[in-house]
Amino acid sequence: MAYCTRAQLQGLMDQTFAATSSPTATEVEQMIDDVASEIDGVLRAAGYSTPVTATNALPLLRRMNQFGAAPSAFHGSALTDTEPARVKYWREAYDAFLVRIRKGEQYLPDLDPEEADDEFAFGIAPGIQREEYWLTDQEIS
C-alpha cells in the first residue's frame, strides 16, 4: 500500500506525469509503490505491523514516500545526473528517516514497535557446552 499518490508527488515536484511524459504516470506510480514497499520492509524489521494505518503516522509516511520516490522520478525525466538542491534534500531526508527507524532513534507517532521474540530465536539451538576433555592447555594426540 503506497502512502502517497501520484497527485501528491506531482504537487511536491511541481511536475505533471501523464501517459506520454517521461517518466510516464504508470512508471511513477510503480516508483511510489517500490518506495512504500521499502518503507514497509524497514518498518517490519523494526517491529511495526504494516501497512501502517494509524492516522497520526500517515502524514509522516506520506511525506517520506514522496521524498523517496521524487529522486527516481526526477532522474527518469532529467537529462543530467546533477541533482538540484531540492532533489538532494528529498533523497537525504528519506535516507536519514530509514536510518533513524533502523537504529530505533525514531518511532512512528502513536505507534510502538512490537517486542522481538528473542527467546524463540535463541531457543532454537541449545548452547554448546565445552567439555573438560577439550581444554586449551591440553595437547591433542
Image (tube, rainbow, N blue to C red):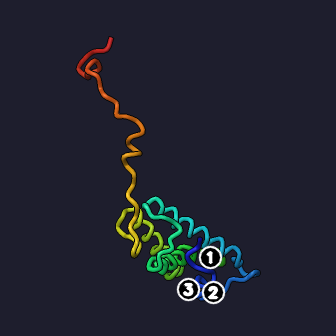
What residue sits 62% from the left and 85% below the top? 7
The local secondary structure at tag 1 comes to: helix
Marks 3, 1: nearer the viewer: 3
Q: Which is nearer the N-term, disc 3 or disc 1?
A: 3
Q: Is residue 103 above or below residue 130?
A: below
What residue sits 66% from the left and 86% below the top? 16
Q: Is residue 16 left or right of residue 44?
A: right
The local secondary structure at tag 2 comes to: loop
Q: Is residue 121 above or below residue 57?
A: above
Labelled disc at residue 12: 3
The kind of residue tagged 3 is Leu
Give the image location of residue 104, x and y in percent.
36, 64
**Residue that numbered label 2 is attached to:** 15
Within-10-Å neighbours for mark 1: few <14, some 14–19, many 20+:
many
> What distance separates the C-alpha of mark 3 from that of mark 1?
11 Å
Give the image location of residue 125, x and y in percent.
41, 36
> What distance separates the C-alpha of mark 3 from that of mark 2?
8 Å
Give the image location of residue 91, x and y in percent.
50, 74
Q: Quadrant of the C terminus?
A: top left
What residue sits 40% from the left and 75% below the top? 109
Within-10-Å neighbours for mark 2: few <14, some 14–19, many 20+:
few
> What distance separates the C-alpha of mark 2 from that of mark 1?
10 Å
The local secondary structure at tag 3 comes to: helix
- Which of these two is toward me, 2 or 11? 2
**Residue that numbered label 1 is attached to:** 73
What residue sits 25% from the left and 17% below the top? 138
